[in-house]
Image (cartoon, rainbow, N blue to C red):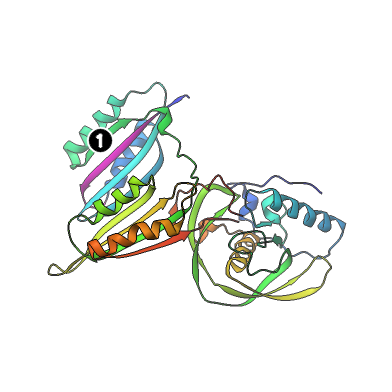
Amino acid sequence: MNRVHFAVTVISKDRPGIVADTAEVLFRLGCNVEDSSCTMLGGDFAMILTISHLKPFVKSRLVEEFKRLHDEKGLVAHVRSLADDELNRPAPVGELCLVSVYGADRPGIVYRVTRELADRLITISDLNTRLIGTEEEPVYVMMLEAYLPDGSTIDDLEQLLAGLREELHVEIGVRVITPVAL
Amino acid sequence: MSIRPILRYPHPLLKKICRPVERIDSEILTLIADLIDTMREGPGSVGVAASQVGVTLRLCVVDVSQSKLGKECNHGLLVLINPEVLSSEGAATMREGCMSVPDYTGDVERPTKILLRYTDEKDTLRHVTAEGFEAVAIQHEMDHLDGLLFLDRISSLKSGLFRRKSYR
């Protein structure tokens, strides 16, 4: 493999230009942005990227440039080198499901749900949470997509989560997403 | 009959508006047979448009009868020449992928029921009401005839690979 890969996270108080500032650094260094996911979290803007550069290229060049970006513009970045076996997303084997959870906010919603999934080797591929409602009555919403292990069904997942409905006093919906090749 | 290679974006022909089929001659019949073979060969594929094999004519084939989502409600193999949607109703979102845009899927909202007019391979004008997954598949293939990919219609992207196991 003639390219070296890194995972980069950037977070900053939100303002126009965070993506452009980050992308400019990467462009100037000759890095390719491969996958990325960027979103507002509260009043911050967060970016997660995997990037690559032709070898030879050392991580310290990225770190230096992001340090300058921190000093000049306040962005906080972290860079991690990626091993070859971290580059490719493994092909899913089981059913893909969407799980939605919402209810009056209380401690442990994310923890209890994701622990149940992890203990059954269910792989989360996407997860978002948002605190909505009012200050007096905060409501917690979590949406996640997960791959069931081969042989496990949506009914198994329903059953697994049914107990949590009672325990956490939340609504939990589960549905199958069937990606279709057309 | 043969399997033709599927063009992948950014091949420019995938963004061309296709021209109507004027005469169903032996060349068109060969193309139809090849499209059917190519569809059957694709992993879990339920449709192919002529432009996906580089022929920019308004012609596509769809068959959802062997798929998990379509087996309850379908018209079997449909050869759609110069198809037109006369009316549509409902809306549902489905996570679509496309052989011309591999390794990517996105949520696309489309009508759930369509009234379709098309000419079949025997040069007969036909009307069909398609619903559910069959309607989605037909609309996806018909988009190719206008140079549209599901990427032109998505509301959100999911970097989903398809399951190794076929979901037919």
User: Where does the image place residue A47, in percent across and percent down from the top left?
Assistant: 30, 45
For the residue pair A41 and A170, the one nearer the viewer reads as: A170
On whether residue A138 falls in the magenta region, the answer is no
The part of the image, by quadrant, that contains residue A171 is bottom left
Against B42, is B86 above or below? below
For the residue pair A123 and A133, the one nearer the viewer reads as: A123
Taking the view exactly as shown, the residue that stands out farthest to the left is A136
By secondary structure, the bulk of the magenta-drawn segment is best described as strand
On whether residue A11 falls in the magenta region, the answer is yes
Q: Residues within 10 Å of mark 1 (few under 14, many from 20)?
A: some
Under circle 1, the secondary element is strand
User: Where does the image place residue B92, in percent across and percent down from the top left?
Assistant: 49, 69
* Quadrant of the frame with the C terminus of chain A: bottom right
Q: Is residue A168 left or right of residue A126?
A: left
Against A90, is A102 above or below? below
User: Where does the image place residue A38, in percent across and percent down from the top left?
Assistant: 32, 49
Residue where numbered disc 1 is placed: A78
What is the total number of numbered labels drawn onto the structure image?
A: 1
Going 60% across and 62% down the picture, which residue do you hit? B140
The part of the image, by quadrant, that contains residue A32 is top left
Q: Disc 1 residue type?
A: His
Going 35% across and 41% down the picture, which residue do you hit? A49
